[in-house]
């Protein structure tokens, strides 16, 4: 058997040096990194519609720029996809078509005719999802009668009630509360150009598509409840309705988050703007101004195009870029990054997570610049691990931040031993059967990737008193492994992301390389390696009925994950790793970094995907530098948590 190919050290050093220089050039003067976070056509289309909903002054230059973006990303199938090279998505296509028509594109133009034909071939706009139906209804372009009723009185229910906001995920909570107001008041957009899309409706009854099939009792019970709510909707006592609307308003105001916006995510932010407008807030009212400003900050302007991001990712980008720079021992960049991250730790706000864990002190980091009510376990774990590694190399002043981060992560471990992203024990799965939840993403239960990150962090810190929490986390991960050896990835696509995350955790927790869970995962990663040496996985792997990897062309991000996972399992000297390293070296660009159009970020599986523009910048560098360090240090496995 031939010995594994080992790339020449000088070539590897040059590749790492160029990549580190390229990444350092992107670091902001205050120490942080932030890259574009791109979704599909939905968000820029909704931004256009928001301006016309509010009747804001025309900005024809901006509209033209967004129009160019939307036309460019229209797919060969005539519509718009949820990710690069993806299949047709009806709801995204209806929104993109409406936005382009609002901008002024004539319905007879070729791209509009193709989109319209594709929409009608799939049953028309009557078959879009719930959130798109709401968007259409707000413009008088679709009926409220086909939208599941969510009365604002929901916010007044006791916490023990089966349907309660605290039982939903943070993103659902922040999106739904302003929608409760809009659904009750049913305002109509100003729509100064009077644009509608009647031509997108096909004849026949409107049908509500479901993202998942739940238990018969829940599905039919909630459907019956919806019919009952529609019958009594106009008969709610006025005082009770006024009290409920005030409670919704107060919920939003408390979490308005300055000009970073409600929940720091576009749908919640845009809904809050429309809510304030519907409640009669003047355009110059401070709350409405803050909400509207938060939306504007999400715009990305390129040479001749503009699009709107779903949110921004500075903490996540900075923490991961710092991990890559730690691997290349670029101390100035790491020190500046951690100095920037340290004051963003949320120490004085007990967010929504405290309803389930009232005795836990705050101590997490959010994903965005500010989102104090909603820090997350994933960001917190990655930041703490970076700080701990830097502390071990002499950087001071990090002890308190690390301690509070560890304390918060421990406090949010779920009863089953896993961790969710934002809340503990957010596993009320029956709620995904309510008619409103046709997207199937109402909850934030424990997942393998977040659980793995928390196990990695605790294991890296190495405190003996955390052994029980680590063991429970490892047992959760072992139970969650798929038969073929992979783990499902919630926040990254998909099984490659989940498997990389878990292999890092199992290594940090001390499992031997021949442990059954690790051995099966290694065999699976090797089996799905592409012939060219890289790795790739399609977002189609989330499709209903799919239970494993869905092949895709190799890309830098997923190749980096696979390499980091294999090296965590002791595979540094194998041919699979050497071939992956060679593929990354061959794909390196002139600026020292890597490019990638494929979407490998998870927003909501099957509903919403993300293109992290930073992923191909720091993950390949991280993998190459780790490979070099392990080979030169004669180490079989990394000592870090991830």
Image (cartoon, rainbow, N blue to C red):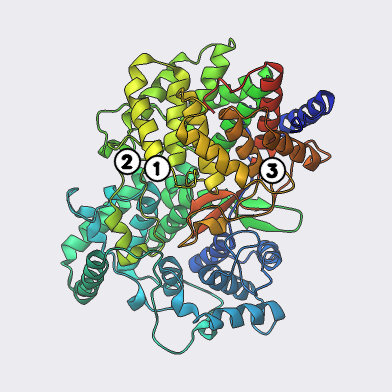
Residue 189: image location, x then y, percent: 46, 71
Q: Which mark is residue 480?
A: 1
Residue 118 appears in the figure: yes
Give the CA separation, mark 2 to mark 3. Answer: 36 Å
Tell me, yes or no, whether the two marked residues, 2 and 1, touch with CB atoms within 8 Å.
Answer: no
Which structural element holds mark 1? helix
Residue 504 pos. (x, y %): 52, 30
Is disc 1 surrounded by few (<14), some (14 to 19) or many (20+) residues within 10 Å?
some
Query: Is disc 1 in contact with disc 3, using a CB cutoff of under 8 Å?
Result: no
> 635 and 414: which one is in front?
635
- Front-most of residues 578 and 129: 578
Which mark identifies residue 55? none
Q: Callout 3: few (<14), some (14-19), or many (20+) C-alpha neighbours within 10 Å? A: many
C-alpha separation, residue under disc 1 versus residue under disc 3:
27 Å
Is the residue under label 3 in contact with that under label 2 (CB below 8 Å)? no
> Where does the N terminus fall, quadrant-wise?
top right
> Which residue is painted at 43% across and 61% down in the image?
274
Residue 637 in the image, given as x and y percentages of width and height = 59, 23
Location of residue 606 with respect to 617 vertically, above or below: below
Q: Name the side, left or right, on which 69 lies relative to 130.
A: right
Residue 396 vertical position relative to residue 342 in the rendered view, above or below? above
Taking the image as shown, residue 210 lies to the left or right of residue 608, namely left
Provide the secondary structure element on which disc 2 rests. helix
Q: Which mark is residue 556?
A: 3
476 or 610, which lies in front?
Answer: 476
Location of mark 2 (residue): 352
**Residue 197 drawn at (x, y percent):** 53, 80
Residue at position x 54%, y 14% in the image: 391
Q: Compare marks 2 and 1 and give the one earlier in the sequence.
A: 2
């Amino acid at each position: 058997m031939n010995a594994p190919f080992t790339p020449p050290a000088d070539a590897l050093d040059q590749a790492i040096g160029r990549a580190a220089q390229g990444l350092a050039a992107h670091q902001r003067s205050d120490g942080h990194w932030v890259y574009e976070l791109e979704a599909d056509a939905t968000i820029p289309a909704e931004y256009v519609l928001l301006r016309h909903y509010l009747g804001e002054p025309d900005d024809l230059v901006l509209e033209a720029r967004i129009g160019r973006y939307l036309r460019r990303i229209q797919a060969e199938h005539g519509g718009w996809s949820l990710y690069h090279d993806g299949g047709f998505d009806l709801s995204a296509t209806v929104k993109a078509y409406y936005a382009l028509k609002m901008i002024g594109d004539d319905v007879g133009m070729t791209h509009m005719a193709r989109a319209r034909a594709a929409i009608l071939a799939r049953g028309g706009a009557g078959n879009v999802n719930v959130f798109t139906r709401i968007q259409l209804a707000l413009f008088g372009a679709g009926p409220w009668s086909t939208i599941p009723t969510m009365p604002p009185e929901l916010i007044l229910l006791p916490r023990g009630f089966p349907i309660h906001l605290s039982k939903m995920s943070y993103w659902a909570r922040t999106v739904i509360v302003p929608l409760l107001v809009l659904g009750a008041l049913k305002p109509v957009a100003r729509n100064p150009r009077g644009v509608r899309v009647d031509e997108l409706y096909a004849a026949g009854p409107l049908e509500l598509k479901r993202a998942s099939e739940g238990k018969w009792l829940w599905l039919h019970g909630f459907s019956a409840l919806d019919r009952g709510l529609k019958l009594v909707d106009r008969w709610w006592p006025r005082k009770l309705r006024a009290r409920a609307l005030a409670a919704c308003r107060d919920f939003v105001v408390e979490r308005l988050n300055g000009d970073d916006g409600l929940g720091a995510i576009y749908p919640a932010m845009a809904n809050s703007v429309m809510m304030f407008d519907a409640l009669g807030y003047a355009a110059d009212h401070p709350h409405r101004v803050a909400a509207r400003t938060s939306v504007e900050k999400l715009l990305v302007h390129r040479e001749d195009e503009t699009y709107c991001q779903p949110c921004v990712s500075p903490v996540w980008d900075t923490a991961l870029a710092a991990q890559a720079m730690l691997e290349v021992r670029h101390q100035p960049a790491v020190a500046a990054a951690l100095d920037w991250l340290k004051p963003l730790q949320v120490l004085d706000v007990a967010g929504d997570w405290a309803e389930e864990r009232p005795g836990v002190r705050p101590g997490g980091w959010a994903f965005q610049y500010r989102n104090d009510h909603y820090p997350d376990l994933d960001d917190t774990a990655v930041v703490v691990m970076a700080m701990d590694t830097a502390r071990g190399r002499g950087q001071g002043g990090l002890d308190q931040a690390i301690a509070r981060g560890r304390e918060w992560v421990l406090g949010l471990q779920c009863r089953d031993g896993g961790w969710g992203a934002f809340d503990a024990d957010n596993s009320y799965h029956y709620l995904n059967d309510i008619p409103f939840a046709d997207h199937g993403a109402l909850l934030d239960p424990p997942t393998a990737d977040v659980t793995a990150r928390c196990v990695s962090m605790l294991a890296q810190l190495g405190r003996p008193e955390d052994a029980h929490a680590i063991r429970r986390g490892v047992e959760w991960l072992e139970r969650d492994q798929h038969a073929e050896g992979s783990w499902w990835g919630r926040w990254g696509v998909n099984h490659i992301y989940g498997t990389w995350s878990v292999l890092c955790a199992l290594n940090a927790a001390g499992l031997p390389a021949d442990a059954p869970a690790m051995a099966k995962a290694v065999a699976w990663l090797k089996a799905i390696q592409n012939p060219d040496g890289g790795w790739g996985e399609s977002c189609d792997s989330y499709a209903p009925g799919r239970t494993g990897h869905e092949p895709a062309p190799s890309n830098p991000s997923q190749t980096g994950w696979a390499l980091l996972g294999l090296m965590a399992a002791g595979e540094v000297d194998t041919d699979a790793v050497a071939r992956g390293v060679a593929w990354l070296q061959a794909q390196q660009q002139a600026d020292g970094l890597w490019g990638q159009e494929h979407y490998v970020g998870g927003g909501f599986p099957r509903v919403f995907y993300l293109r992290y523009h930073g992923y191909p910048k720091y993950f390949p560098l991280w993998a190459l530098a780790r490979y070099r360090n392990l080979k030169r240090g004669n180490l079989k496995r990394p000592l870090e948590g991830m």
